[in-house]
Amino acid sequence: MINEEFAEIDLSEQIDNPWTKDTAIAIIKGKTSFSVKINAKDKNDLKKFFRKSGKTRNIKRHNRRGVVIIYSFLLYHLLKISNGLSDKIKVCNDMGHSRGVNEYLTKICRYYREFPIQEKINLSFKKRKKKKSKAHQIAKEVAHGRKPANITLVKPHIDKIKEILKLNLNLSKKV
């Protein structure tokens, strides 16, 4: 059980596993929750935009960075809409290394000409547990359409993600 002074964040339906399902990320503290959702169609559009085919280590890294950027974008918007909910947040470590998430979260803040969110909010990444968190339950309800998201990413958001992907993955495609 997470201490009530912390808010918790979790993801339902990994971004890249599978690409064919909607993904939602949610934050909860007490009985207050917020969520952000990306539709499968938009995820596939992003996949086609940045993903490279092949099995080399560099290609796998490139593809993983793209997924972490998308996750960080969802996390950024979730933290913005839940502003003030808590200054201490436990984030489920779904994306692996927290360093990559923190790095791209900072870059996304700079893209929007803002100070890094991590300066105001203490983000700590928790280990995976067998028991699903309350945030995971909210995210799952949102991803499966049983509960509306506070924000569902639409074309302008997707275009911004493409721009951020292009800047950070050295892509030469037009946005």
Image (cartoon, rainbow, N blue to C red):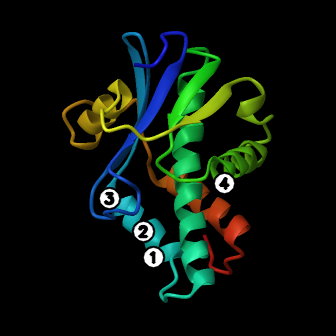
Question: Which callout, 4 or 3, points at the residue further toward the start of the chain?
Answer: 3
- Identify the image quadrant of residue 29: top left
Percent coordinates x, y for residue 60 in the rendering: 54, 77
Q: CA distance from mark 1 to mark 2?
A: 5 Å
Between circles 1 and 4, the one closer to the viewer is 4
> Which of the numbered marks, if any, corresponds to residue 45?
2
Answer above or below: position of 87 versus 58: above
Q: Are marks 4 and 3 in contact (CB under 8 Å)?
A: no
Mark 3 or mark 1: name the one nearer the start of the chain. 3
Instruction: Identify the secondary structure beneath mark 1.
Output: helix
- Give the side of residue 72 with respect to residue 28, left or right: right
164 vs 146: above or below: below
What residue does disc 3 label? 40
Q: Quadrant of the N terminus?
A: top left
The kind of secondary structure element at disc 4 is: helix
Q: CA distance from mark 2 to mark 3?
A: 9 Å
Q: Residue at x 59, y 56 (%)?
A: 69
Numbered label attached to residue 100: 4
Cβ atoms at labels 4 and 2 below 8 Å apart: no
Residue 67 percent location from the top left of the image? 52, 61
Which residue is disc 1 drawn over? 48
- For the point 33% across and 64% down, the residue is 19
Instruction: Determine the secondary structure under disc 2.
Output: helix
Residue kind at label 2, given as amino acid type: Asp
Asked where in the image residue 57 lies, by quadrant, the reply is bottom right
> Nearer the N terminus, badge 2 or badge 3?
3
Marks 1,2: beta carbons within 8 A: yes
Residue at screen point 36% across, 10% down: 31
Disc 1 marks a residue whose amino acid type is Lys
